[in-house]
Image: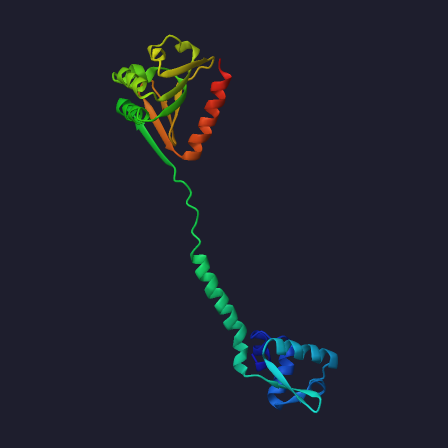
């Protein structure tokens, strides 16, 4: 790569590199002399020289009412790089202050058996409110302490709303005043419960299985659907 090509790599255009090199070789020249020496249109030469002045690569003095141009210190070729470096260093500092948005972590836990059901109920009973649909009353039948838990709800005045299938009308679970119950003409084996920022899905048949999902957005979405269903049911 020759010096002409290197000047272009440093940020000069082809015509700027030609004019710059000619001035560097000759020391001082007028625009007309430069145009003649490098065989460039005079008007274009003035445009090129103005660009070089703007870039800080050449300067001029007035002699006998004429502009005489000369090259600035070649180290000025570093000026755009230094300017960009300063800008980028500032940008790096700014970029380092930007932290990624912390997306909520989702936790999923799966339990099995009576103890898993007991763990779920112990979580729910501590809440100020919970909502459930697809209720069957089987958890009440499975755990001996459910009667005491239901009575505890009455004391704490927690808000509890449950939508159950019509086939479970008259179940012992439905008789507690602390728990509002509505009945829907829908058959469901699984119960979904919404409490705090969690939802649980449990199925009590041969062996209870309980899935608990912790995610605020998911819980709120289920809560919205529950409220809609609750208003629809008589």
Q: Classify residue 6 as left or right of residue 63.
A: left
Front in this rendered view, residue 162 or 2: 162
The image quadrant that residue 190 belongs to is: top left
Q: How is the image coloured?
A: rainbow
Q: Position of residue 8 (x, y in %)?
A: 59, 75
Residue lying at the far top in this picture: please name it.
Answer: 170
Which residue sits at x=41%, y=34%? 216
Which residue sits at x=38%, y=40%? 105
Residue lying at the far bottom in this picture: please name it.
Answer: 64
Front in this rendered view, residue 150 or 12: 150
Please say whether residue 20 is visible from this viewpoint.
Answer: yes
Above or below, 232 relative to 36: above
Front in this rendered view, residue 9 or 230: 230
**The N terminus: image quadrant:** bottom right
Which residue sits at x=36%, y=23%? 202
Above or below, 234 relative to 12: above
Q: Position of residue 42 (x, y in %)?
A: 74, 82
> How many marks can you see?
0
Above or below, 5 relative to 29: above
Q: Classify residue 91 as left or right of residue 44.
A: left
The image quadrant that residue 128 belongs to is: top left
Q: Classify residue 222 as left or right of residue 174.
A: right
Which residue sits at x=27%, y=22%? 114
Q: Position of residue 137 (x, y in %)?
A: 35, 15
Q: Position of residue 25 (x, y in %)?
A: 61, 89
Above or below, 56 relative to 66: above
The image quadrant that residue 62 belongs to is: bottom right
Please say whether residue 192 is visible from this viewpoint.
Answer: no
């Amino acid at each position: 790569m020759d010096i002409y090509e290197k000047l272009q790599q440093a940020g000069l255009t082809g015509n700027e590199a030609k004019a710059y090199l000619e001035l560097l070789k000759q020391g001082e020249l007028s625009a007309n002399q430069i145009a003649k020496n490098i065989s460039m249109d005079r008007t274009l030469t003035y445009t090129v020289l103005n660009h070089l002045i703007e870039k800080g690569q050449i300067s001029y003095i007035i002699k006998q009412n004429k502009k005489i141009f000369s090259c600035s210190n070649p180290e000025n070729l570093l000026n755009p790089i230094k300017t960009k470096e300063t800008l980028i260093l500032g940008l790096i500092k700014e970029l380092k202050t930007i932290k990624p948005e912390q997306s909520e972590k989702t936790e999923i836990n799966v339990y099995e058996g009576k103890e898993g059901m007991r763990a779920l109920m112990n979580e729910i009973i501590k809440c100020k409110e919970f909502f459930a649909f697809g209720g069957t009353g089987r958890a009440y039948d499975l755990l001996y302490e459910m009667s005491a838990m239901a009575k505890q709800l009455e004391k704490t005045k927690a808000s509890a709303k449950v939508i159950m299938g019509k086939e479970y009308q008259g179940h012992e679970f439905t008789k507690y005043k602390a728990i509002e119950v509505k009945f829907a003409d829908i058959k469901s084996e699984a119960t979904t419960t919404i409490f705090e920022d969690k939802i649980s899905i449990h199925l009590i048949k041969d062996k209870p299985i309980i899935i608990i999902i912790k995610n605020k957005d998911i819980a709120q979405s289920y809560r919205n659907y529950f409220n809609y269903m609750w208003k629809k049911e008589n």
